[in-house]
Image (cartoon, rainbow, N blue to C red):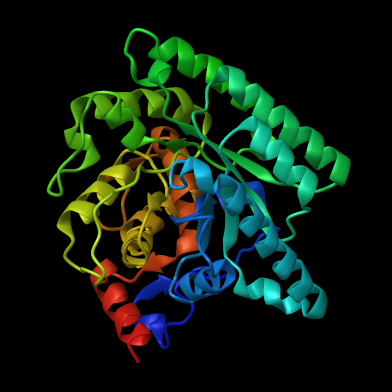
């Protein structure tokens, strides 16, 4: 897959075009390649058709949910629906291996440990990238990852796991740091299978009877903002990739000027978060377009990483100092993002990219 690959004559937008990646890319590359992760309930009647359509519209990462988006009386049907989906995928791949190129990175958000075991016992899930583990804490987390690790080793494959941090012990200030450190110990032990760490902003808000309005970002909810800050503090220092929370308002028509979603995604990026959970196809390209690296940041990062000095060098843009040691980790991350998402030419931004994508999709 290559982000924004359907755009013709994109040289005027990109200084450096996005590079290809796929299901069998390295864990590090995949961690930065998830971008806008589109959730859809596992109950949809035409799952494969919907997946292929959304992939064609820019959704390179799709999660099939069997948790909060599926009512209790529909769980078994959703499980069978997803198992049936991967049977179809396996059949299509046997007929034509190139069918893999049509698929996004696929994940399943499970409901429980019991359900994870059931799914792994009933299907090999050809084409699956991994699972998302909700309500993740130190106790259930060990169980989830021990099952996944044992399965991977027994079957000589790599399915990844992505924990969602959303439990009361994490958001409650009196238990937060202790709980996060316990969770980090679990994740450290299974880091080879962890693509990124996700944050359940909706669950956190619900515990306090909060729901942000359409005109507010998640960072305007002080109790959730403070929790996000501590999650970043505990995990980001050791280079774990952390994803932005879902913005739950959407329109059926793409809004280039959705200033709240843009602001929230930019705040995610400023705080070191990479990618974002989205719930509607019109949000996908907007979020992904904001993941593209600016040329100024890219040139600064290249100069920092390649510098033979270990002090201060002036930016090529003559507007800032680049300190080699303090900025080195930032620079290396920028280069990883640039490799996957590309680099804007000077003077270009998400606005031009979205306009080009929109005109392409409405032909």
| Residue found at x 50% / y 40% | 72
| Residue found at x 78% / y 49% | 122
Pinpoint residue 4: horizontal percent, then vertical percent: 44, 74
Q: Is residue 203 left or right of residue 19?
A: left
Residue furthest out toward the bottom? 363
Q: In the depicted view, which residue is nearer to us: 356 or 157? A: 157
Query: How many numbered marks, from 0 up?
Result: 0
Q: Is residue 328 visible?
A: no
Residue furthest out toward the left? 215
Image vertical order of residue 142 relative to residue 289, above or below: above
Q: In the depicted view, which residue is nearer to us: 44 or 77? A: 77
Residue furthest out toward the front? 73
Q: In the depicted view, which residue is nearer to us: 53 or 222? A: 53
Image vertical order of residue 288 relative to residue 11, above or below: above
Pinpoint residue 48: horizontal percent, then vertical percent: 59, 70
Quarter of the image where one finds residue 298: bottom left
Q: Is residue 359 left or right of residue 258?
A: right
Quadrant occupied by the N terminus: bottom right
Pinpoint residue 126: horizontal percent, then vertical percent: 75, 60
């Amino acid at each position: 897959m290559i982000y924004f690959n359907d755009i013709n004559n994109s040289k005027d937008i990109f200084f450096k075009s996005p590079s290809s990646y796929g299901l069998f890319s390295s864990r590090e590359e995949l961690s930065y390649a998830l971008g806008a992760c589109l959730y859809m309930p596992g109950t949809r009647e035409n799952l494969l058709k919907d997946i292929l359509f959304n992939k064609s519209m820019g959704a390179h990462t799709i999660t099939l949910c069997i948790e909060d988006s599926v009512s209790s009386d529909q769980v078994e049907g959703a499980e069978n629906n997803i198992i049936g989906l991967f049977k179809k995928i396996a059949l299509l791949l046997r007929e034509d291996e190139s069918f893999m190129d049509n698929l996004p990175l696929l994940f399943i958000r499970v409901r429980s440990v019991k359900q994870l075991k059931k799914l792994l016992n009933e299907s090999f899930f050809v084409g699956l990238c991994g699972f998302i583990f909700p309500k993740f804490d130190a106790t259930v987390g060990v169980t989830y990852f021990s099952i996944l690790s044992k399965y991977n080793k027994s079957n000589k494959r790599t399915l990844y796991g992505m924990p969602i941090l959303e439990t009361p012990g994490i958001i409650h200030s009196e238990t937060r740091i202790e709980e996060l450190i316990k969770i980090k110990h679990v994740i450290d032990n299974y880091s080879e299978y962890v693509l990124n760490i996700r944050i359940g902003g909706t669950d956190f808000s619900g515990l306090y009877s909060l729901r942000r309005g359409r005109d507010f970002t998640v960072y305007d909810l002080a109790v959730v903002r403070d929790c996000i800050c501590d999650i970043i503090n505990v995990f980001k220092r050791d280079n774990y990739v952390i994803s932005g929370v879902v913005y739950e308002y959407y329109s059926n028509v793409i809004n280039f000027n959705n200033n709240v979603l843009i602001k929230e995604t930019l705040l995610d990026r400023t705080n070191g978060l990479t990618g974002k959970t989205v719930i509607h196809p019109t949000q996908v390209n907007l979020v992904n377009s904001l993941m593209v690296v600016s040329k100024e940041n890219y040139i600064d990062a290249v100069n920092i990483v390649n510098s033979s000095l270990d002090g201060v060098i002036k930016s090529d843009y003559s507007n800032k100092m680049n300190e080699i040691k303090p900025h080195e980790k930032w620079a290396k991350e920028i280069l990883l993002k640039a490799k996957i998402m590309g680099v804007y030419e000077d003077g270009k931004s998400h606005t031009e990219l979205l306009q080009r994508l929109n005109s392409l999709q409405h032909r």
